Amino acid sequence: MHSRLLTVVGISVPAKTGAGVPGTQMISILTKLFVFSRDHFTCIFCGKGVPEVELVLDHWLPVTRGGGDDLRNLMTTCTRCASQKGDRTRSEFSRSLREKNLSATASSA
Ligand SMILES: [Zn+2]
């Protein structure tokens, strides 16, 4: 029932999030819903939401760098921003986005 609801709002729910991967835990659907609704169902980096983009949960501090699955370390991103972010922290990725925007502005001027 939950996965049907999430499909309706354009959120994909992998059947086994992080299952079998050391250092990761299953993130419950309720946790995902809480974080998505806290972040207003929009990507915190590009500001886009469903149905324009597909939303996923990402970590402020990546799991690979010691981050956990607690609510304070989870944020809503779109699949595109999440894949670009990789294992950087939120602030590292935000900085790289700003630098990219600055260089794009400079080169177009
Ligand atoms: Zn995004």
Image (spheres, rainbow, N blue to C red):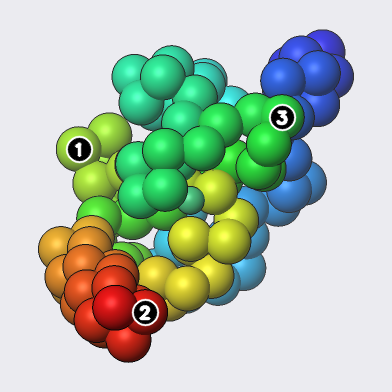
Q: Which label was assigned to residue 52? A: none
Determine whether, in the image, residue 55 is placed left or right of residue 52.
left
Which residue is identified by label 3?
Answer: 51
Question: Mark 3 to mark 1: distance in Å?
Answer: 25 Å
Mark 1 burial class by Cα count in 10 Å: few <14, some 14-19, many 20+ = few
**Quarter assignment of residue 5:** top right
Quadrant holding the C terminus: bottom left
> Residue placed at 35% from the left, 50% from the top?
45
Which residue is identified by label 2?
Answer: 108
Q: Mark 3 is on which residue type?
A: Pro
Q: Measured from the top left, where is residue 100 in percent x and y?
A: 30, 77
Going from N to C along the chain, the mark reached first, 3 or 1, is 3
> Residue placed at 42% from the left, 38% from the top?
47
Frontmost residue, 1 versus 97: 97
Q: Mark 1 is on which residue type?
A: Arg
Mark 2 burial class by Cα count in 10 Å: few <14, some 14-19, many 20+ = few
Find numbered disc 3 in the image and state the secondary structure of the residue it sits on: loop
Q: Are marks 3 and 2 in contact (CB under 8 Å)?
A: no
Is residue 37 depicted above or below 78 in this figure? Answer: above
Q: Which label was assigned to residue 72? A: 1
Determine whether, in the image, residue 34 is placed left or right of residue 54.
left
Question: Mark 3 to mark 2: distance in Å?
Answer: 30 Å
Going from N to C along the chain, the mark reached first, 3 or 2, is 3
